[in-house]
């Protein structure tokens, strides 16, 4: 997930003939915002992609991507605040921008990180894994390699559990074949409302398969994770291919005395799209709730048997299509997105159902697309 407040990066575009037009480059120098001193070994990456690097001795960095579009530029450096900005590439082959980052003056106060993890920490880690990684079959094949960097604040008065990590969380996803570096910015479980929220920044690295069979398994699992996902949905909506791709959308609303009422008619979402803030983005305005059914894949048995982490003894319904629902939050009126499924304002809406069930264990790089069958 991405945070709510990001600012638009204004870059100086430079013509270059040394790169093919299919590649787009962002480069510059990472500097201390106060002194202007160049900062070497800063981690610079585009969130939710495989594009990342480390600044050199002179603070310089360079990121090369294959596709134009908007990316979340993230810079992490020990002792400094996280730098986050939205950058749009594509107007020219090369964009140059120097990044200024500020020292982090955050005081942890009485928070103490214990070298030895006690029974409470172990119990909290079980909860953290459940909410963070998820409870899917893919989640069972995920492993956090450095759990010791995660600590918790368990507030019994407010009935909340917060997690924080001073170092990135390293996740090995054997189901999809990725090593994920996750910079956790916020994590909280509110037991009184039975809601959980978290966000952070991810960088993906493909794992090397030991056999062709393993690689084929990863590719098949990636395809399954992509199909029916939010990225798949918004990409299909942008191209007016929801029906072709297996999506059915219906409007719904909660009516006092009647509960949730679902409109039996299929919603014509593409006709309601508006022009976005950029020349390639579109905006989806809607009120109340949208129910999104993906008819090409069925709900897993694990999903039907679990609700909020609790085991359900109800009967499993076979061949039930995956169903999710979304609603706008606060005063937001629309979701703005690009052709690749990138969402400008991901915290403008709330998702539940199958989309809410799938967590970090289902995450793919934003630029992932299934390979076309021959």
Image (cartoon, rainbow, N blue to C red):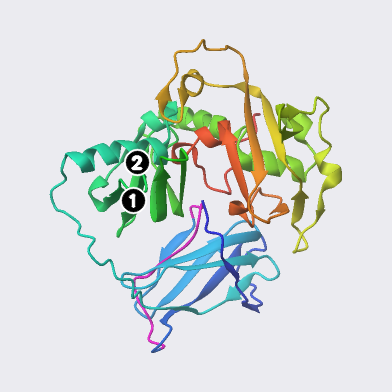
Residue 83 spot, x, y in % from top left: 46, 69
Q: Which residues are magenta?
A: 36-50
Q: Are marks 2 and 1 in contact (CB under 8 Å)?
A: yes
- Tell me if residue 208 comes above or below residue 42 in the rendering: above
User: How many numbered discs, if any?
Assistant: 2
- Tell me if residue 312 comes above or below residue 325 in the rendering: above
Query: Which residue, as the protein is rendered here, is positioned at the far right?
Result: 271
Q: Is residue 337 left or right of residue 156?
A: right
For residue 193: magenta? no
Query: Which residue, as the protein is rendered here, is positioned at the far left?
Result: 116
Residue 157 spot, x, y in % from top left: 33, 48
Residue 128 spot, x, y in % from top left: 34, 41
Seen at 33% across and 76% down, the residue is 105
Q: Secondary structure at mark 1?
A: strand
Q: Residues within 10 Å of mark 2 (few under 14, many from 20)?
A: many
For residue 47: magenta? yes
Quadrant assignment, res 292: top right
Q: Secondary structure at mark 2?
A: helix
Query: Which residue, as the protein is rendered here, is positioned at the far bottom?
Result: 35
Looking at this view, is 288 or 20 the one in front? Answer: 288
Residue 208 spot, x, y in % from top left: 38, 40
Q: Residues within 10 Å of mark 1 (few under 14, many from 20)?
A: some
Seen at 84% across and 46% down, the residue is 272
Please indicate, yes or no, whether residue 247 appears anywhere in the rendered image.
no
The quadrant of the picture occupied by the C terminus is: top right
Report the disc number at residue 128: 2
Seen at 60% across and 67% down, the residue is 87
Report the disc number at residue 163: 1
- Looking at the magenta stretch, what is its main secondary structure? loop
- Tell me if residue 48 comes above or below residue 303 in the rendering: below
> In terms of sequence position, does the residue under pointer 2 or pointer 1 come before the other?
2
Report the disc number at residue 343: none
């Amino acid at each position: 997930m991405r945070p709510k407040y990001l600012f638009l990066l204004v870059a100086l575009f430079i013509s270059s003939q040394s790169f093919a037009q299919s590649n787009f480059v962002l480069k510059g120098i990472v500097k201390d915002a106060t002194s202007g001193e160049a900062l070497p070994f800063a981690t610079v990456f585009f969130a939710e992609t495989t594009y990342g690097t480390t600044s050199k001795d002179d603070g310089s960095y360079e990121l090369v991507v294959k596709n134009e579009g908007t990316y979340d530029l993230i810079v992490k450096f020990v002792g400094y605040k996280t730098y986050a900005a939205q950058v749009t590439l594509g107007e020219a082959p090369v964009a140059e921008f120097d990044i200024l980052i500020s020292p982090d003056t955050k005081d942890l106060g009485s928070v103490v990180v214990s070298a030895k993890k006690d029974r409470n920490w172990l119990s909290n880690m079980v909860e953290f894994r459940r909410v963070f990684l998820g409870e899917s079959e893919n989640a069972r094949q995920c492993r956090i390699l450095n759990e010791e960097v995660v600590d918790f604040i368990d507030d019994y008065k407010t009935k909340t559990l917060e997690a924080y990590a001073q170092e990135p969380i390293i996740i090995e996803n054997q189901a999809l074949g990725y090593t994920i570096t996750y910079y956790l910015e916020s994590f909280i479980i509110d037991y009184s409302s039975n809601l959980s929220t978290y966000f952070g920044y991810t960088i993906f690295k493909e794992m090397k398969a030991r056999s062709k069979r393993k690689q084929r398994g990863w590719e098949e699992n990636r395809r399954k994770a992509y199909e029916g996902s939010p990225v798949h949905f918004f990409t299909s909506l942008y191209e007016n291919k929801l029906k072709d791709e297996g999506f059915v959308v219906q409007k719904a609303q909660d009516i006092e005395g009647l509960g949730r009422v679902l409109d039996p008619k299929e919603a014509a979402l593409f006709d309601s799209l508006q022009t976005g803030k950029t020349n390639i983005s579109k905006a989806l305005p809607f009120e109340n709730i949208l129910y999104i059914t993906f008819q090409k894949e069925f709900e897993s048995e694990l999903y039907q048997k679990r609700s909020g982490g609790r085991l359900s003894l109800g009967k499993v319904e076979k061949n039930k299509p995956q169903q999710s629902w979304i609603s706008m939050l606060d005063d937001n009126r629309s979701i703005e997105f690009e052709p690749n499924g990138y969402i400008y304002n991901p915290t403008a809406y709330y998702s539940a159902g199958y989309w809410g069930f799938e967590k970090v264990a289902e995450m793919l790089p934003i630029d992932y697309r299934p390979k076309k069958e021959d």
